[in-house]
Amino acid sequence: MFRSRFLRGSVASALFIAFVGCVKTDPSIDTGAGGSGAGAAGTTGSAGTIGSAGTTGSAGITGSAGTTGNAGNVGNAGRGGTTGNAGTTGRGGTTGNAGTTGNAGTTGAGGSTPPGSLTLSGLKIDPNPRMTLSCYVSWTTSAAANSEVQFGVGGYQFHVVDSAQVTSHKVHVIGMHAATAYQIKAVSTNATATGSATGTFTTGALPSGTPKATVVTKTTDKIQPGWTLMNAYLNGTAPGLMIIVDVDGLPVWYYVNGTTNDGFGATSVDFVSNHVLIGPASSEPAREVDLEGNVVWTGPTGGTPNATHHVGKTSAGNYLLIRESNTSARVEELSASNQIVWTWDLYSTSIKPKTTAADWCHINSVTADLAKNVLYFNCRYQGLFKVNRADKSILWQMGAAIDDSQTGDITYLPDNSVRFNDSHDPEIHDDGTILYYDNQGWTGHTGGQMNGNFHTQVVEYMLDEAKKQATLTWRFPGTFSGVDNWYKQSWYTQIWGDANRLANGNILITAGNKSGTTRHFEVTRAGEVVWAIDWTNVGGYRGVRIPPVATPLP
């Protein structure tokens, strides 16, 4: 689907140990180290020893600052009663200056007084019954505080934080890998206190058939941070699987889409307001699910023609569903209660393609810009249409080349050779550019003209709507040097694929196959592939980079 920049199993076991989280505080820390307390008072000098014969011993120094006087010579006692000369009276030693009383050490600034102790109680760690890779951590606190759960293997490496100040806490923790024992720490902090309690949790197994990714390329410092949401087609032998993987290709979240086998696989996925939007698949209707695995919306079942490929959501909260047959290519805008509030069908217009193909449109994605009151409607074989939602007129057609290399009313620059051939999921950007996943032909397009070089690419154009000109601005693999031969020679996906521009300017690409190898990869504007994972014998239709729910601890 378009992602415009203006929109766009088994139950895990849980073991835990709960205790009251308490920080033992050292009083010297609580009040700050107080400088060095009161400064030591000057030492009181010892009183001068009185000489035995009256000789005054030298006065001890009062205060360490006083200089100790030399002791007077002690006179010898007179013999036989003769009073001996009193001996020279010792100079009583200079009375030491009473040492200055030491300054009372400055009271320390208190250092930074650490938070007091916050009591945590009733820690519980419960498995999520809908998904074996996550758990619920709950506890209470003696005062309102935030909710944080730290987790990791052999320590704590990641955390999930909710800033709401509450006393009853419950956090849904995702970001863990399958069949792994984790340490769990619940932490609550407010302006004056903090506390924690710890336990453990062991995740369960993944659903049968979950693809195991092979990491092909990973240049960490050039990758747009985040997780990647994608669908997995399990060759028609099981329901479709929606998966979120981390940078190592390891699942951190999944959703089993219904109970019936997905026999088609072209199921859209998107991430909207922290929910996963899932397109219709075989007998399963479109759905919206939250990250806990709760279904928050279910699209209509049945209807004519069949719903297919894609579901989108408008900024007003309505849903966009597409239906197609060889006599209709229709979009329906639905309310949350599945009432049709707007509809448009390409077959009801004057568009008549130059082809004998019965399937001459093959709609695969739509989006609405409500601020401009327009719809973008993509046919694989006819190209991208911009439609006025008010009067339902076609404003322009950015034509594809597969059946007619001159179709539409947009001129391609520098010349018509840069026109895309047949596309999936165009992405319209606020800067005027449009990004296409260009399959470059399909031998199964019965009755079509079979244009295309059968080597897939991603192309971007700058569209001047006033002049109706589209100038090629980027193409991969194009003429970039140093690109691996897989991209230069082997990359050809006949019927699926997706391309999204990321926040750092990189492009995330799903080279989707219904059978064989599906590759998800990220490439820079300079043509360097910085991340790639392969799924063998597992299909993939679309992929979306999303912000991680759990982030590394600082």
Image (cartoon, rainbow, N blue to C red):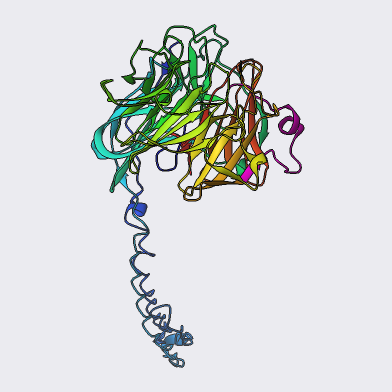
For the residue pair 137 and 499, the one nearer the viewer reads as 499
Asked if the magenta segment contains residue 482, the reply would be yes
Which image quadrant for residue 404? top right
**Vertical comparison of 413 with 39: above or below:** above
Q: Position of residue 83 (x, y in %)?
A: 41, 90
Q: Position of residue 70 (x, y in %)?
A: 49, 86
Which image quadrant for residue 278? top left
Which image quadrant for residue 275? top left
Point 40% across, 39% down: residue? 7
Asked if the magenta segment contains residue 320, the reply would be no
Would residue 216 be seen by someone viewing this image from the given angle? Answer: yes
Point 43% across, 26% down: residue? 346
**Vertical comparison of 541 with 304: above or below:** below
**Vertical comparison of 531 with 290: above or below:** below
Q: Is residue 333 left or right of residue 202?
A: left
Magenta extent: 473-495
Q: Is residue 426 left or right of residue 44?
A: right
Q: Position of residue 121 (x, y in %)?
A: 28, 29
For the residue pair 237 and 198, the one nearer the viewer reads as 237
Would residue 157 be seen by someone viewing this image from the given angle? Answer: no
